[in-house]
Image (cartoon, rainbow, N blue to C red):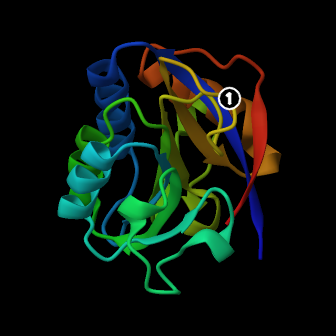
Amino acid sequence: MSNSNAAAVFTTADLAEAIRAVRTLLGIADVRHGEVDFEGVIRSSDVLAHVRHVLPDLEWWALAGKECGSSEAGGDPADCLPIRVFDWGRPLDRAEPFIAALGPDPAAVRWDLDGWPAVPEAGLEEVSQKYAYLTLSVNSRDLYQDELSQDHTVHVHVRRDDQAARIQWLADQVGGRFTGRVEMAPL
């Protein structure tokens, strides 16, 4: 397993603005073979119904522990709320419907990209898939839904050797700023 550094570059209370920032960054990135991964905490049966409509086969377990219920055990997630949900390797077009289904519940949506481009004027070389990710934390400021909030944060993942320059350049592209906050993200 490897890790990346995820830097917060844009935070807003307006979900549409956060999605605009994500779309801008996806327009910069190489996404030819991109995928999207989902992780979240579902607290209500209404949100669960909407999320399952978008991602019917998602994995889940009760926040109280797997022994209280999980997809692996074949339980009904509606009987085990709140639950943590996961879904991996989905097409990019599943991201926005999932985000729309969340309501007030927190989640992280991670786009696995094919690369970040070279930016010669900023001294940045092309970056391979290994270090090219983008995460939107919805109703949370961190990658793991531990810091709940009513705003949404866009994180860019980069490699260490061009971390500061790449983060700042990507933040500039969305009208954001690098706050200095970087989280280690297992991949």
Locate residue 90: give its quadrant: bottom left
Pinpoint residue 91: horizontal percent, then vertical percent: 27, 68
Q: Is residue 15 above or below residue 29?
A: above
Number of marks: 1
- Determine the residue positioned at 56% across, 20% down: 149
Pinpoint residue 76: horizontal percent, then vertical percent: 38, 72
- Determine the residue positioned at 62% across, 56% down: 63
Pinpoint residue 57: horizontal percent, then vertical percent: 32, 77
- Tag 1, which secondary structure? loop
Q: Is residue 86 above or below residue 120?
A: below
Q: Choose between 115 and 109: the one closer to the eye.
A: 109
- Determine the residue positioned at 28% across, 27% down: 20
Q: Choose between 13 and 45: the one closer to the eye.
A: 45
Q: Is residue 83 above or below residue 171?
A: below
Q: Which residue is mark 1?
A: 147
Lateral position of residue 19 relative to residue 89, left or right: left
Q: Can residue 117 be seen here? A: no
Pinpoint residue 101: horizontal percent, then vertical percent: 25, 44
